[in-house]
Image (tube, helix red, strand yellow):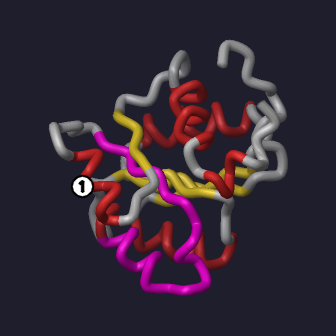
Amino acid sequence: MHSIPRDLLADWSIVVIDDEEDSLEVANIILLEYGADVHIAYNGQQGLRIVEFIKPRFVISDLSMPTMDGWGFINALQANPEIADIPVIALTAHAMVGDRERAITAGFHNYLTKPLTVNTFMTDLVKLLIDIPELAEHLNI
């Protein structure tokens, strides 16, 4: 995992949904460095519209946001058969005991904790992507 190929996410559309500029900026810069086509949204409602239009490989969504939070987003995504199978990774600053299980039960594939850091973001993300069979087969690592 020490050497992640810089083209690992080449030609992958990814949607990142978060109301915090810092998290969006870190995710955007790093995902772009690994070749991804990144689309950002500031709340779940905006994110849902982008996901419906783009149909990305996966989504990273904050849980606590205005307008529509991550829980509302995952429910709306799963209610739409055209996008229900798109993997979503939850993003939270409030990692408590049981949060991972609650997120998985709600339909998220896994979750990352904030703050996102340049040093660990890709390593942590790749570990989660490998656990998603429909994405793992497309990773060249």
Figure quadrant of the C terminus: top right
Residue 87 is inside the magenta segment: yes
Residue at x-position 46% and y-position 51%? 89
In front here: 43 or 3?
A: 3
Residue at x-position 53% and y-position 76%? 84
How many marks on residues?
A: 1
- Could you tell whether 128 is left or right of 9 in the image? left
Q: Quick check: 116 above or below 61?
A: above
Q: Position of residue 135 (x, y in %)?
A: 68, 52
- Could you tell whether 115 is left or right of 30 in the image? left
Q: Position of residue 16 (x, y in %)?
A: 53, 52
Quarter assignment of residue 82: bottom right
Quarter assignment of residue 44: bottom left
- Could you tell whether 95 is left or right of 86 in the image? left
The amino acid at mark 1 is Arg
Quarter assignment of residue 50: bottom right
Q: Position of residue 75 (x, y in %)?
A: 36, 75
Figure quadrant of the N terminus: top right
Q: Quick check: 126 above or below 129?
A: above
Query: Label 1's element?
Result: helix
- Could you tell whether 117 is left or right of 115 in the image? right
Residue at x-position 74% and y-position 31%? 33
Tell me if mark 1 has few (under 14), some (14-19) or many (20+) residues whose alpha carbon lies within 10 angstroms of its own: few
Task: Report the residue marked by disc 1.
Answer: 102
In front here: 116 or 21?
A: 116
Q: Position of residue 134 (x, y in %)?
A: 67, 57
> Which region is colored magenta?
72-92
Residue at x-position 64% and y-position 31%? 30
Which residue extends farthest left?
97
Q: Quick check: 118 above or below 49?
A: above
